[in-house]
Image (cartoon, rainbow, N blue to C red):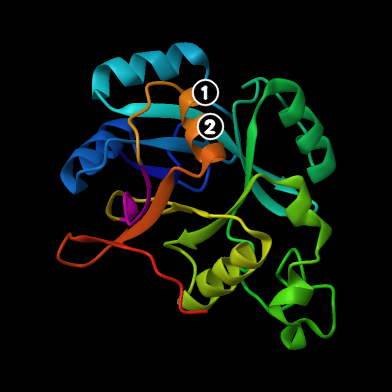
């Protein structure tokens, strides 16, 4: 079951103009079975989610991309009414209470510049080894790491994959789509079909998935890290 685990829409992300109709069209066009909608500003209400599932015929779950003190975190399985969570340790506590799942999104975006959330404040970030980067306390507060993001450079994705491997994590993939053409560029492929957000979380926890990206000819190829 091919899913894009990082999608934005005009409904809940102010920097995105992707309509729900166009999102459905894109998903069907590229051959994925669904996605996690991870809005910046507000999560979808259950009523909207169920209506869209029925209309689109796709698997959809409503997550949220939270800006925290240690970067952007995709949260699945949390109450859609949550507001103003800005610390990763607090988001972890809420996820544990709700049985939710946290993915640290694009952790090496802009690395090694000062704009990188995790290592930017360190003056020597460009000299850190994979083992040293893997000691950052943020990794212990998330369930997974997004290692394949269409809006990251190959180097940024490779660094994320290397750290994930050092930590024994499998990684996830998502396009971080804000436009029609970005949908399904990077996907997480589950070994089993799922019908609910809870089942998706169960499969991710079990590591029954692999990552793939779409070539210009439309073919999906498994992601193999070179780092």
- Label 2 – label 1 distance at C-alpha: 5 Å
Q: Which residues are magenta?
A: 182-190
Residue located at (42% from left, 46% from top):
209
Q: Could you tell whether 159 is left or right of 225 in the image?
A: right
Q: Position of residue 107 (x, y in %)?
A: 64, 62
What residue do we see at 17% from left, 59% from top? 218
Please name the residue that numbered disc 1 is placed on: 198
Q: Which residue is mark 2?
A: 201
In percent of the image, x 66 and y 20: which residue is there?
81
- In the visual, does 172 lie left or right of 72? left
- Residue at the (46%, 11%) spot, across then down: 47
- Is residue 71 located in the magenta-colored stretch of the structure? no
Residue 87 appears anywhere in the view: no
Residue at far top of view: 47
Determine whether label 2 and label 1 are within 8 Å by CB.
yes
The label shown at residue 142 is none
Quadrant where the N terminus lies? top left
Q: In this view of the protein, can residue 27 be seen by the observer?
A: yes
* 33 to the left or right of 200: left
Relative to 160, residue 203 above or below: above
* Residue nearer the viewer, 189 or 78: 189
* Residue placed most toward the observer, 191 or 83: 191
Determine which quarter of the picture holds residue 4: top left
Position of residue 3 measured from the top left corner of the image (x, y, whole percent): 36, 41
- The location of residue 27, given as percent across then percent down, is 25, 41
Q: Secondary structure at mark 2?
A: helix
State the image coordinates of residue 103 (x, y, percent, origin top left): 61, 46
């Amino acid at each position: 079951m091919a899913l894009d685990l990082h999608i934005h829409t005009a409904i809940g992300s102010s920097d995105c103009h992707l309509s729900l109709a166009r999102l459905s069209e894109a998903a069907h066009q590229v051959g994925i079975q669904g996605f996690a909608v991870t809005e910046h500003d507000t999560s979808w209400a259950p009523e909207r989610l169920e209506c869209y599932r029925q209309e689109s015929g796709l698997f959809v779950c409503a997550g949220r991309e939270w800006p925290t003190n240690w970067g952007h975190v995709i949260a699945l399985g949390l109450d859609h009414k949550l507001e103003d969570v800005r610390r990763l340790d607090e988001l972890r506590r809420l996820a544990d209470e709700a049985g939710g799942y946290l993915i640290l999104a694009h952790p090496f975006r802009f690395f090694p510049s000062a704009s990188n959330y995790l290592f930017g404040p360190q003056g020597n970030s460009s000299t850190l080894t994979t083992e040293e980067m893997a000691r950052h306390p943020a990794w212990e507060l998330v369930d997974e790491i997004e290692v394949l993001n269409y809006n990251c450079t190959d180097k940024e994705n490779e660094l994320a994959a290397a750290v994930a491997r050092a930590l024994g994590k499998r990684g996830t993939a998502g396009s971080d789509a804000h436009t029609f053409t970005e949908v399904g560029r990077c996907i997480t492929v589950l070994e089993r079909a799922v019908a609910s957000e809870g089942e998706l979380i169960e499969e991710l926890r079990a590591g029954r998935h692999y990552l793939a990206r779409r070539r210009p000819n439309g073919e999906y190829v498994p992601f193999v890290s070179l780092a």
